[in-house]
Each structure stands twice: as C-alpha cells, then as structure tokens.
C-alpha cells in the first residue's frame, strides 16, 4: 500500500491530534502501570518516549506523539530506514524524521540512553526481566502486562494512552478502529460463519504444520475479522500456548478448517495439493488457502496495531474472501 493511501486512511479515522497540541489533554500524574514485572511509576507527563520491538511505536504515533527512538523491524516489507510503511507514514504526518535503532540482534542500550527518554514503552514484547531492569535504569519502562507477546492491539493502545496521559484520546482511537473493522467486515458477509487457522508450513518439510492459537496476535486478529478457530484446533493447546505442532499423520484435525492462512508464495498451494497427506485436507483440496509472502504488507500487518489495521484491512479481507469463495 502506498504512503499517500496510508495517510488518507489515517486522516479518515480521525485519530490524529494534529489539530491540538500534542499533550492538550489534562492528565493526572503520577500514573502507576502494573505489568508482568511489578509496577512502573510515571511521575510526570512524558515528553521523550522510546519504543522498542516491532510494533510499539504505532499507538504512540497514532496518539500524536513522535517517539525519539524506535526499533528497526527485522521482517516483512520494510522501507529503506527499516520501518514499516504505516509507521513511516505516521512519522511523516507528524513532520518528524524517525531515529531508528538497529537492534534486531538485541537491545541497543547505548542508543536508548543516547535518546534521553523519560519513558520506554514496550507493552507488546517478550522483554526479559533482566532487560526490563536494565531499561528501567535509563527511564521508567512499561513492558507487557501478563504474557509475553500476547498483547492485543486494543490493550497496546490502552496502556500506551494511560502512560502518555491521553486516556480519553486512547479510548476514541480504540473505538474508531473498532468501527473501521466493523464497517469493512460488513462489506464481506461471505466470511461470516467460516472457520480458519493461521499456520506456518515449511514447503521443504511437509511432515509438520505449526498452527497459531488465539493467544497469538495473528490468530486473535483473524478471529476479530469474524473467522473462528475451530475447537478441534484450540483444544490441542495448553494454557499459555501460542502455537501447536501438528504432525502430518494427524492432519485430519484440520478438516474442520474452512480457510487456511499461512506464510508462503504462490507455489505453496500446489506443493500442498501434490502431497499425499496434505491434499486430504478439504481446505487444501479446495484451494481455500490464503498465502502471505514476505514482500507483502500483510506479512507484518497481521500483527494488528492501530496503524496497521487501516493500512492493510482491505487487502487482508480481499485475500480471505478469495479463499472463502473456494470453500465447498
């Protein structure tokens, strides 16, 4: 999706604060935020925010605040500076050139410290307690609430708004995003009632299928788009499981899945249909498989955020619709 289109979608959502000062909302500080490693106290309204990991900058930007440092994204259709198109579009809208940390091999604490943050926001992450403690020595740090990598786009926006002292704007942002999802879903009634599974299938090793559970943001967003992960799949997971490994010998457990969503190029479906066991799955036999290549905005866009949703929802729903039309 081109940058002009993303900017137009952001404007249509009316989630920008460009018409008012960045911190126009009256906020009561100090603010306490509970999380997996205890409680973080934010004494004053932050002015210099650093975000780490792939998506944590998005809610900050959507609330009209430009982070003074962000992480480079290691996967997907990133632009020249290492950020995703919708993230760059939001920085551009705020008139700020992003300061990008090349921390794909690990947190660059020196770069974080050099940015002189008064808040580090990483609510959607798998940051360890040791990493949290090191970051907290630089500035108050907000990690994930309970389970690593299990923060939904809504939870991310909510905690970000609280940390920034912009809770009313955050609530409006969440409501506007939900309304957009509902509006777009209304254009795709063919998805209603369909079951789906978000998978990873390695074409060089078709002995195993990895299926993401609703605890994972990708499967959670798929369900938010009205496509239910069937109980035959979710019942395989234990508490806290993001995914399950399904051997090809048990591939019949995918028979209740109408649509399979998975990473891969256009050749993947043919390889699955040519495989003796995989071809017995109705969704594969019917061609009801939606593949997402690593050059697609959907590669990272399926990790839903308040910026990625308006940027990719049309493309995603169209992709799902094409697959759903093949369900028999």
Image: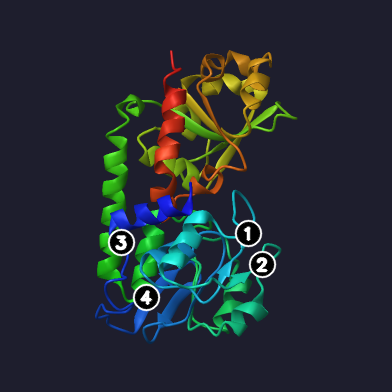
Asked if residue 264 lies left or right of residue 51, the reply is right
Which numbered disc flags the more N-terminal residue, 4 or 2? 2
Residue mark closest to the camera, 1 vs 2:
1
Instruction: Check whether the beta carbons of the residues at disc 1 and disc 2 lie within 8 A of each other.
Output: no
Hey, which quadrant is residue 66 in on the image?
Answer: bottom left
Residues at badges 1 and 4 in contact (C-beta under 8 Å)?
Answer: no
Residue at which label 1 appears: 80
Image point (48%, 65%), residue name: 57
Q: How far apart are marks 3 and 4 (CA)?
A: 15 Å
**Mark 2: which secondary structure?**
loop
Number of callouts in the render?
Answer: 4
Quadrant in the picture for the C terminus: top left
Mark 3 and mark 2 residues within 8 Å of each other at the beta carbon: no
Q: Residues within 10 Å of mark 4 (few under 14, many from 20)?
A: many
Q: Name the residue located 32 percent from the left edge and 71 percent from the top edge.
A: 18
In the rendered image, which residue does mark 2 sit on?
103
First in sequence: mark 3 vs mark 4: 3
In this view, the residue farthest toward the front is 4
Q: Residue 223 carries which label?
A: none
User: Mark 1, mark 3: which one is toward the viewer?
Assistant: 1
| Disc 1 + disc 3, Cβ < 8 Å | no
Give the structural element (helix, strand or loop) at label 3. Answer: loop
Question: Which residue appears farthest toward the right when viewing the image?
Answer: 204
Is residue 170 or residue 87 the one in the foreground?
87
Q: Mark number for residue 164?
A: 4
């Amino acid at each position: 999706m081109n940058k002009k289109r993303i900017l137009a979608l952001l404007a249509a959502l009316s989630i920008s604060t460009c018409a008012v000062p960045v911190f126009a909302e009256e906020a009561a500080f100090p603010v306490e935020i509970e999380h997996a490693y205890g409680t973080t106290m934010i004494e004053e309204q932050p002015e210099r925010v650093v975000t780490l990991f792939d998506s944590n900058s998005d809610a900050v930007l959507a609330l009209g605040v430009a982070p003074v440092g962000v992480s480079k994204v290691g996967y997907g259709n990133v632009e020249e500076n290492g950020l995703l198109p919708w993230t760059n579009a939001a920085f551009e809208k705020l008139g700020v050139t992003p300061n990008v940390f090349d921390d794909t091999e690990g947190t660059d604490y020196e770069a974080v410290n050099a940015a002189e943050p008064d808040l580090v926001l990483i609510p959607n992450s798998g940051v360890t307690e040791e990493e949290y403690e090191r970051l907290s020595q630089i500035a108050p740090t907000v990690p994930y609430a309970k389970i690593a990598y299990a923060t939904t786009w809504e939870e991310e926006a909510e905690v970000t708004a609280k940390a920034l002292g912009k809770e009313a704007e955050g609530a409006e942002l969440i409501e506007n995003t939900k309304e957009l999802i509902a509006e777009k879903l209304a254009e795709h009634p063919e998805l209603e009632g369909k079951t789906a599974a978000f998978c990873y299938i390695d074409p060089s090793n078709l002995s195993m299928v990895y299926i993401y559970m609703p605890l994972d943001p990708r499967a959670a967003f798929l369900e938010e788009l009205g496509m239910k992960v069937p109980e035959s799949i979710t019942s395989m997971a234990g508490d806290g499981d993001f995914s399950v490994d399904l051997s090809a010998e048990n591939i019949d457990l995918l028979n209740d899945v109408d649509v399979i969503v998975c990473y891969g190029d256009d050749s993947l479906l043919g390889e699955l249909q040519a495989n003796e066991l995989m071809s017995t799955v109705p969704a594969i036999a019917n061609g009801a498989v939606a593949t997402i290549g690593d050059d697609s905005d959907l590669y990272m866009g399926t990790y839903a955020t308040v910026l990625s949703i308006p940027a990719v929802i049309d493309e995603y729903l169209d992709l799902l619709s094409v697959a759903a039309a093949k369900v028999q």
